[in-house]
Image (tube, grey):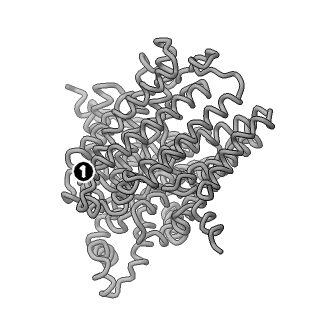
């Protein structure tokens, strides 16, 4: 149980909160913390465990969000179908990035992922006939489980918690399984891993595809929860950076890191939004200044992230 | 057919400004082996410098260039000392996230200080158009092009013939050997970073009268600069110049044929195609991309 300690605290608190908290704002914050944490965890599968750092993951988030919006409004299909369609489309799209990951390393790969998400941003914001262009699309709210429309926040908390737990367990699996060890080998020294017979090329493609599909699933949930899809938000570089940010600050390549990072980042963000929203909206940017600086410090001083740092302290006798 | 001279001139004018942004980026990469993901934010700061100088003390953007050079040089030295020095020997990912963090911080400093509003500079020559034969172009565009080209040429000459330029190139070629010859690599990196920042800051000042000024204004230009720099081969200054012309041509011809809405798709597709077919760039060294150097 000890190695799950931090995760138990976070997920346990999230599970108990709706029993005592009735405040819609606090529940909303909780849902967002879980959702952003899950997204960072999905990023972590490729960026942390496989070492394929992408700044284009917003592409898959956007595909998931647009699947919900377009299938819901145009063909009146259930978000659950959109979830599967989005995940399949993202997996297909991720093959492009996966292929590139086998040809490019370091900054070249990062630049390619940025370009990839920018292409989707432009297509989504300019293809007016299909996506309604830069206006964005409202996602219809239809109450019921099959249509993923829940008026009360409590249901959303447990749904988000379920997805978060799933991602946590997937990451845990990656830490102790054969495929996880192989990924770590590829991440640390790809040539050596290949020499030992690890199918590094295929592994990277699989890790990126899995990461993309999970990101897309979260995108669908997010679109259903928020109810509106704006191309300049869902495909933005800011969003891709955000996925990476929480994972790195929390602890890249650790299972609890992305959730820990999300607790810190999302809490400060929602607090500033609530305090300075409306007239001083610009002041909300303070949290990103803090996190920009924190990112610079963390990658240099404690590359294992805050979760690893705190964990290291507590383990000392 | 009579549109061709106009397209040609638009391409060259646009390419000149892109070149100044890209040259700074490629210089930093060529010598320090760091891709500066905060490059666009210094462009944005240049735009804001021009905007505030114009709004507060009615200073013409082209006069702002004079104080801008030392200001951005100092800003470059400061960010190097505070942020970059510690990661110069670190892994790619650490360097990438350090500059991404810098970008995030600078972008939001601008947002907090000056809000997200679009701001514009309207000097008296704002809508002055020069006509030459069948072609017409904005006078600010010509001025920006001329200054950008003068700067780029000066930088080329500096890198080629000055002693410091040779020292910088020597460090880029072989850090160890350069250190053994008594070159202080840290000073070279600080200087390189500062020069790169000056280039992009100046480009920002020049672009301010032409484009709206807002906290994320740097993004669209820097994305372009990445395309240019990869096209020309990361670290290759002549390549950056040619790459700028190619990207400008794609943009100008693309908007002429397909309309302005789709031009960006063209150069991003060009970018991905280049990465797939010849990732070291048109003029770059083969194999550089798979080493990540």
Residue under the image location 29 percent in, 51 percent down: B230
The secondary element bearing badge 1 is classed as loop
Residue under the image location 41 percent in, 62 percent down: B196
**Horizontal side of residue A2 vs B8, given as left or right:** right
Question: Of B25 and B88, which appears nearest the observer?
Answer: B88
Question: Of A112 and A215, which appears nearest the observer?
Answer: A215
Task: Name the spot of residue B220 as percent of width and height, x first.
Answer: 44, 42
Q: Quadrant of residue A16?
A: top right
Residue under the image location 45 percent in, 48 percent down: A45
Relative to B17, does residue B183 appear above or below in the rendering? Answer: below
Task: Name the spot of residue B71 as percent of width and height, x first.
Answer: 53, 64
Relative to A268, does residue B290 appear above or below in the rendering? Answer: below
Relative to A296, does residue A236 appear above or below in the rendering? Answer: above
- Report the chain holding disc 1: B
Residue B6 seen in the figure: yes
**Horizontal side of residue A238 vs B23, given as left or right:** right
**Horizontal side of residue B111 vs B140, given as left or right:** right
Task: Name the spot of residue B225 as percent of width and height, x first.
Answer: 37, 49
Question: Of B198 and A265, which appears nearest the observer?
Answer: A265
Q: Look at the image and tell me in which quarter the N terminus of chain A lies.
A: bottom right
Q: Which residue is mark 1?
A: B279
Task: Name the spot of residue A5 as percent of width and height, x first.
Answer: 64, 55
Relative to B31, does residue A208 appear above or below in the rendering? Answer: above
Q: Look at the image and tell me in which quarter the C terminus of chain A lies.
A: bottom right
């Amino acid at each position: 149980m000890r190695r799950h300690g931090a995760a138990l605290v976070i997920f346990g608190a999230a599970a108990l909160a709706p029993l005592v908290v009735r405040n819609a704002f606090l529940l909303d914050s909780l849902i967002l913390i879980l959702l952003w944490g899950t997204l960072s965890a999905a990023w972590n599968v490729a960026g942390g465990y496989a070492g394929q750092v992408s700044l284009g993951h917003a592409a898959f988030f956007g595909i998931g969000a647009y699947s919900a919006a377009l299938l819901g409004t145009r063909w009146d299909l259930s978000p659950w179908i959109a979830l599967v369609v989005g995940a399949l489309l993202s997996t297909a799209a991720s093959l492009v990035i996966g292929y590139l990951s086998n040809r490019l390393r370091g900054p070249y790969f990062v630049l390619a992922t940025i370009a990839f998400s920018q292409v989707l941003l432009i297509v989504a914001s300019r293809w007016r006939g299909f996506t309604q262009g830069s206006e964005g699309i409202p996602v219809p709210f239809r109450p019921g489980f099959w249509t993923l429309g829940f008026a009360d926040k409590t249901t959303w908390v447990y749904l988000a918690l379920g997805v978060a737990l799933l991602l946590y367990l997937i990451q845990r699996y990656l830490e102790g399984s054969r495929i996880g060890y192989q990924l770590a080998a590829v991440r640390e020294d790809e040539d050596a891993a290949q020499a030992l017979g690890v199918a590094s090329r295929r592994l990277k493609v699989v890790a990126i595809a899995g990461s993309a599909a999970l990101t897309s699933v979260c995108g669908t949930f997010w679109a259903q929860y928020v109810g509106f899809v704006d191309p300049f938000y869902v495909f933005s570089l800011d969003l891709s950076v955000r996925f990476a940010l929480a994972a790195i600050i929390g602890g890249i390549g650790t299972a609890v890191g992305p959730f820990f990072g999300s607790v810190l980042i999302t809490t400060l963000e929602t607090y500033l939004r609530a305090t300075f929203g409306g007239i001083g909206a610009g002041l909300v940017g303070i949290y990103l200044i803090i996190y920009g600086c924190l990112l610079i410090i963390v990658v240099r001083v404690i590359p294992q992230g805050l979760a690893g740092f705190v964990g290291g302290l507590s383990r000392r006798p | 057919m009579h549109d061709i001279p106009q397209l040609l001139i638009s391409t060259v004018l646009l390419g000149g400004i892109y070149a100044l942004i890209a040259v700074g980026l490629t210089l930093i990469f060529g010598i320090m082996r760091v891709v500066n993901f905060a490059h666009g934010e210094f462009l944005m700061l240049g735009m804001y410098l021009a905007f505030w100088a114009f709004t507060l003390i009615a200073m013409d953007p082209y006069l702002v260039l004079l104080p801008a050079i030392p200001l951005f040089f100092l800003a470059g030295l400061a960010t190097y000392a505070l942020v970059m020095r510690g990661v110069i020997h670190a892994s790619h990912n650490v360097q990438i996230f350090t500059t991404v963090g810098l970008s995030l911080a600078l972008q939001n400093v601008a947002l907090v200080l000056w809000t997200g509003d679009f701001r514009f500079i309207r000097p008296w020559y704002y809508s002055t158009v020069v006509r030459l034969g069948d072609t017409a172009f904005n006078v600010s565009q010509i001025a920006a092009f001329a200054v950008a080209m003068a700067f780029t040429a000066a930088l080329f000459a500096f890198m080629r013939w000055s002693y410091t330029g040779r020292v910088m190139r020597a460090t880029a070629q072989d850090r160890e050997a350069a250190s053994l010859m008594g070159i202080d690599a840290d000073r070279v990196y600080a200087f390189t970073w500062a020069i790169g920042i000056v280039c992009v800051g100046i480009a920002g000042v020049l672009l301010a009268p032409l484009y709206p000024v807002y906290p994320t204004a740097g993004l669209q230009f820097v994305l372009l600069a990445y395309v240019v720099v990869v096209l020309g081969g990361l670290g290759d200054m002549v390549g950056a110049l040619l790459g700028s012309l190619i990207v400008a041509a794609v943009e100008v011809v693309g908007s002429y044929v397909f309309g302005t809405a789709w031009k960006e798709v063209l150069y991003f597709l060009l970018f991905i195609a280049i990465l797939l077919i010849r990732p070291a760039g048109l003029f770059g060294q083969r194999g550089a991309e798979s080493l990540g150097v």
